[in-house]
Amino acid sequence: METLVNFEELSVKYRKTRKMKKTIFGILAVAAGVLLLGFNLNLINPEIKHIIFSWQMLLIAIGLVNIFDRDSIVIGAILLTTGSFFLVPEFLNVPFHLNQVFWPVILILAGLMAITKHRFHKYHVKSSKYWKHKYMHENFS
């Protein structure tokens, strides 16, 4: 009977998360429509249209939607970071092309993650066991 209660709690959390993602998507769609209308009516400076409606902003928008889901928060953060990384040259005067820096930085980060993976894996396994132990005693004792 208790597992049914836990399933219902998880189902409610899933519905709330999904509702939040839909709400964020709706807000972004309304904002995009308002901006597009502003550009078409010459209310907003047309020089920034290529920034607002770019693939970088699309990555940022998808990242924002995904960051509100616990299962895809990492993907959302990656998309936000990538979109922001490639959008920086539009706002700052960078003396080099970020495209030349992107892949070396990705390789360096991948290497650092491979080196430190063992440490994080130990911590994750320990915390996972602790959570399972605590969860089992709280709900099924």
Image (cartoon, helix red, strand yellow):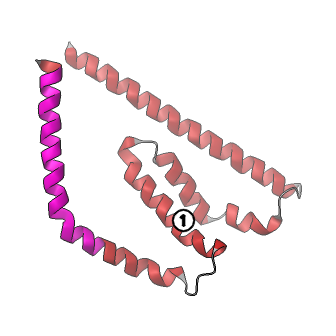
Reply above or below: 116 against 35. below
Judged left or right of residue 67, residue 29 is right
| Mark 1 residue element | helix
Which residue reaches farthest bottom? 95
Whole-percent x, y for residue 1 in the image: 20, 12
Q: Is residue 116 above or below residue 105?
A: above
Q: Based on the displayed image, in which of its 4 quarters is residue 2 positioned?
A: top left
Q: Is residue 122 magenta?
A: yes
Q: Residue at x 27, y 16 (%)?
A: 5
Left or right placement of residue 56 versus residue 30 in this view: left
Quadrant showing the C terminus: top left
Q: Residues within 10 Å of mark 1 (few under 14, many from 20)?
A: some
Which corner quadrant of the image does residue 139 belong to?
top left
Residue 25 image position (x, y, % from top left): 58, 43
- Looking at the image, residue 8 sits to the left or right of residue 131; the answer is right
Chief secondary structure of the magenta portion: helix
Q: Residue at x 47, y 47 (%)?
A: 66
Residue 116 image-quadrant placement: bottom left
Residue 59 colored magenta? no
Where residue 7 appears, as percent x and y from the top left, is 29, 23
- Residue at the (38%, 42%) spot, across then down: 70
Residue at the (70%, 50%) spot, across then down = 32
User: What type is the residue that disc 1 sits on?
Assistant: Ser
Determine whether 99 is above or below 54 in the image.
below
Q: Is residue 105 above or below residue 51?
A: below
**Stretch of the chain drawn in magenta:** 110-138
In the picture of the structure, the residue carrying the numbered disc 1 is 84
- Number of numbered markers: 1
Instruction: Please provide percent x and percent y for residue 14.
Output: 40, 31
